[in-house]
Amino acid sequence: MKTSRIWLLIKGELYRLHKYNVLFISILIAIIWGVVLYFVDSVLFNALLPFLILIDATMMSVMYIGSVMFFEKKESTLSSVLVTPVTNQEIILSKIIANTIHNLISTSLIIIAFIFIKQVKINYPLMLIAIILITAVFTGLGLLLSYYQKDFTSMLTNLMILGFALLLPSALYGFNVLKGNAWEYILLLNPVEAASKVIAGGFKGISLDWHYYFSLFYLLIGGLLTYKYLILPKFKDYAVSISGV
Amino acid sequence: MFKVNNLKFKYKNNKEDVIKGISFEIKEGEIFGFLGPSGAGKSTTQKIIIKILEDYQGEIKYKDKDLKEYNNDFYEEIGVSFEMPIHFSKMTAMENINFFLKLYKNNEDVESLMKRVGLWEDRDKLVGEFSKGMKIRLNLVRALLNKPKMLFLDEPTNGLDPTNAMILKDMIREFKNQGGTVFITSHIMADIDQLCDRVAFIVNGEIKEIDSPRNLKIRYGKRVVLVEYKEDGKTLSKEFPLEQIGKNQEFINIVQEKEIETIHSGETTLEDIFIKVTGVKLDNENL
Ligand SMILES: Nc1ncnc2c1ncn2[C@@H]1O[C@H](COP(=O)(O)OP(=O)(O)OP(=O)(O)O)[C@@H](O)[C@H]1O
Ligand SMILES: [Mg+2]
């Protein structure tokens, strides 16, 4: 693995996020959410901000990497990268890192705006860790998901279904429809739930209990294992299957 | 350069082998052609020897070492042009080229390459606004970026007008004259005939014949001499076998005594030979 080459690839990815208007769209969405949050009262705001950060770092990460993958699929550009000295590992890492940087920018925009407008108490290092970790993990999951989707539309549809399925149990538990301690543990295995725990830790005044640490390491280790055993080894098959050239 | 021995390949979703045990060699410094109809397995073979498709059977050696032992540095030495455009449409030609250029150790002079294929003026245009022919020409620039020792060209002139096709063929010849080796696939007979030192006929995943176009013509062509001459104010014509033509008294008499209008040796085209050898037509409108 060559650092200089990864850096070139990351720059290329970021440049294309800009050229293909993904960057513009994500900043636009951040602004829209900002405006919405500005007008809600403070009780709702305190509940909504963590939720928006969660959606941004999870679902939006999957969507952005999905759009990148399908742009490339349409233009067969991956074939052209495959016949360079670049390794698969470098290709994947550069995509994950570039998209993490990109999402960090849009999420930070929301947070920064509210530090000035509303009195939000953020634990900066922990929030930074939370966003980087969650975005990286979900970008990886998005990459994996995109290997198995025909086109962007089917990816979006499945993402909606998957997102709903992942959020529903947590919501039901929150509204006391699901009762009992067992659920508390089962739900922790849900990566979206784990992400929400880690984001909550990024706000001041939240005590960091074992749920937090469990979720943090769950995402970290789970992310690394998924990368090693699924995202990386399945990449070549995927790249070959779309190289209809 | 490359030695391929008993190569077999099956796509995951297919039942049958697409490549059915082919063997051939690409010698250093030659232009080696793969000629065959659509679906014969030309692109598949190319994708195997450039290490994109991996689960093949048989043996492939590059410079006497098994292809599977090479890592990605293999690509420093080879240039690939695919059948279809492979560029980022929302970036300019130059942005595309510069992105790929930096991924290699060796860099070709881009300006002269782009000028050569006639794209220098359009270098700041988005590739999405390029015509099909322009994209194909950009593919060749892309393939030559890293000063490769070996070029793989999948249908390089497909979709080009005659002038640009000629420029591309000249560039391929120049590449060879500077010591490069070329593998080229095509179903356009003229390209193969004009460019290749040796050609393999591939049909249905099998190689039916390998030789130089010249030898193929000698072996399979009708070896005759056709003479048209004047006699009593009329034009007559007669065919003679090429063997022992100097001892053919009737031929000698005609040449000595009659007013000759034309003499041709019976040239069978490569396409005729292809049909004769494989029993299959190349079925292509470009012929
Ligand atoms: N990705 C794939 N999955 C399954 N079968 C494939 C795939 N790609 C090609 N094939 C099959 O393999 C055979 C050979 O295809 P290939 O693309 O190598 O032909 P070709 O000689 O390059 O044809 P053309 O002149 O049309 O480019 C065809 O029967 C084709 O249907
Ligand atoms: Mg082909």
Image (spheres, coloured by chain):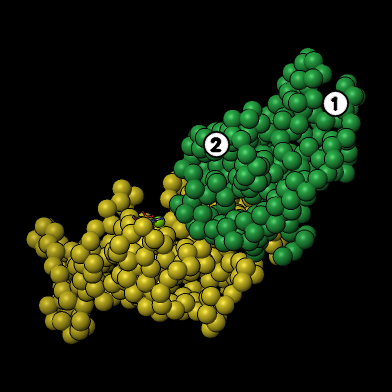
Chain colours: A green, B yellow
Q: Is residue B61 depicted above or below B199 in this figure?
A: below
- Mark 1 vs mark 2, foreground winner is 2
- The residue drawn where x is 34% and y is 74% is B21
For the residue pair B244 and B92, the one nearer the viewer reads as B92
For the residue pair B206 and A110, the one nearer the viewer reads as A110
Q: CA distance from mark 1 to mark 2?
A: 31 Å
Chain of the residue displaying label 1: A
For the residue pair B107 and B236, the one nearer the viewer reads as B107
Q: Secondary structure at mark 2?
A: helix
- Horizontal side of B141 relative to B12 (left or right) equals right
- The residue drawn where x is 55% and y is 36% is A165
Do marks 1 and 2 both belong to one polypeptide chain?
A: yes
| For marks 1 and 2 on the same chain, the one whose residue lies earlier in the sequence | 1
Q: Quadrant of ligand 1?
A: bottom left
- The disc label shown at residue A238, or none: none
Amino acid at dot 1: Ala
x, y percent for residue B58: 41, 77
- Residue placed under numbered mark 1 in the picture: A113
The residue most toward the front is A180
Residue A14 location, quadrant: top right
Amino acid at dot 2: Ala
x, y percent for residue A29: 70, 26
Mark yes or no: residue A99 visible: no
Q: Is residue B15 depicted above or below A155 in this figure?
A: below
- Horizontal side of B58 relative to A222 (left or right) equals left
- Horizontal side of A151 relative to B250 (left or right) equals right
- The residue drawn where x is 80% and y is 29% is A110
- The disc label shown at residue A165, or none: 2
Chain of the residue displaying label 2: A
For the residue pair B242 and A76, the one nearer the viewer reads as A76
Q: Secondary structure at mark 1?
A: helix
